[in-house]
Image (cartoon, rainbow, N blue to C red):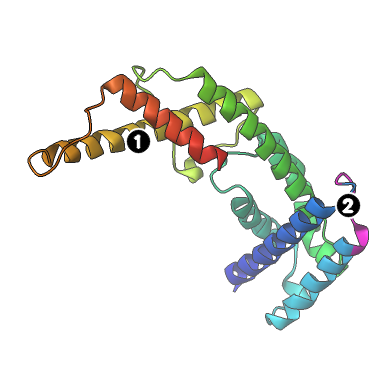
Amino acid sequence: MKNNFCACLAALLMFSFLQSGLSYAKSSSPTQIDASRNNLIGYMLSKQLPVMHFSDKVMNDDLAFSAFDLYLKQLDYQKRFLLQSDVDQLSILAPGIDTNLLNSTIILPDVGYKLLNARIGEVEKLTKTLLAGGFDYTLDEKYETDPDKLKYATSLTDLSERWRRILKGQIIARYLDLVEEQEKEEAKKEEKEVKKKKNDKELWVEAEENLLTCMML
């Protein structure tokens, strides 16, 4: 029952996070929190708990931290945007989740949205810089894809390095797809006219251009 409660609470927090995003996007003063809207969301969340057949007695700091962990995974599951300092800032609000809900007040989603939105903007800039600089495909590198084995980046430099490896990996994957497509095309030589075979340099350029096009959509 504890796990179910935490999951439901985390889902409610994520719902309020999405509501925060919509309000934040429409606000003429995005740096300010709409207190009335925030209180309304908190009231709605607190009223949902009895509906889910959970009593106020089961709401405590332990469950609040468990719900916070689940919320954090939903916020940045692959750990590609938030820094450890952001997580530390959000974790300060974790002990008050239960109290805030009971008081019809919710702060975490507003703070979480603003932090994530700011980091997404920074990542957009750094990925453009990385793509413009190119990559060394002769260097054998690896990057961890399992979020559970990853730690949050400690700085923007650390985050940039993480994204450099991610982008390089995506380009290599696209390059291999292009090689496979070309090999299949060559296999049809006897059936129809085939496009001019591209060399490795041309395939690398096309792989990079494809990724850049996808990121701009």
**Furthest residue in direction front, as rendered:** 193
User: Which disc is residue 91 wearing?
Assistant: none
Q: Give yes or no for contact between labels 2 and 1 (Cβ–Cβ under 8 Å).
A: no
Q: Give the quarter of the image for residue 193.
A: top left
- Say which quarter of the image contains residue 124: top right
- Residue 184, percent from left and from top: 18, 41
Q: Give the vertical position of 45 relative to 130 (above or below).
A: below
Q: Is residue 31 magenta?
A: yes
SS of the residue at dot 2?
loop
Q: Residue at x 60, y 36 (%)?
A: 152
Question: What residue type is disc 1 on?
Answer: Ala
Can you give x and y, in whole percent of width and height, for residue 41 in the image? 82, 67
146 within the magenta span: no
Quick check: can you spot residue 143? no
Q: N-terminal of the two: label 2 or label 1? A: 2
Which class describes the residues within 10 Å of circle 2: few (<14), some (14-19), or many (20+)?
A: some
Q: Mark 1 points at which residue?
A: 173
Circle 1: element type: helix
Camera-near label (2 vs 1) is 1
What are the residue bounds of the magenta stretch? 30-36
Residue 100 horizontal side relative to residue 213, left or right: right
State the image coordinates of residue 44 (x, y, percent, origin top left): 80, 73
The quarter of the image holding the N terminus is bottom right
In the rendered structure, which amino acid carries the disc numbered 2? Ile
Q: Where is residue 142 in the image (x, y as percent from the top left)?
A: 39, 28
Q: Distance between the residues labelled 2 and 1?
A: 42 Å
Q: Which residue is drawn at 44% across and 20% down?
A: 135
Can you identify the residue that label 2 sits on? 33
Split into 4 quadrants, where in the image is the C terminus?
top right
Quick one: 169 or 68, which is closer to the camera?
169
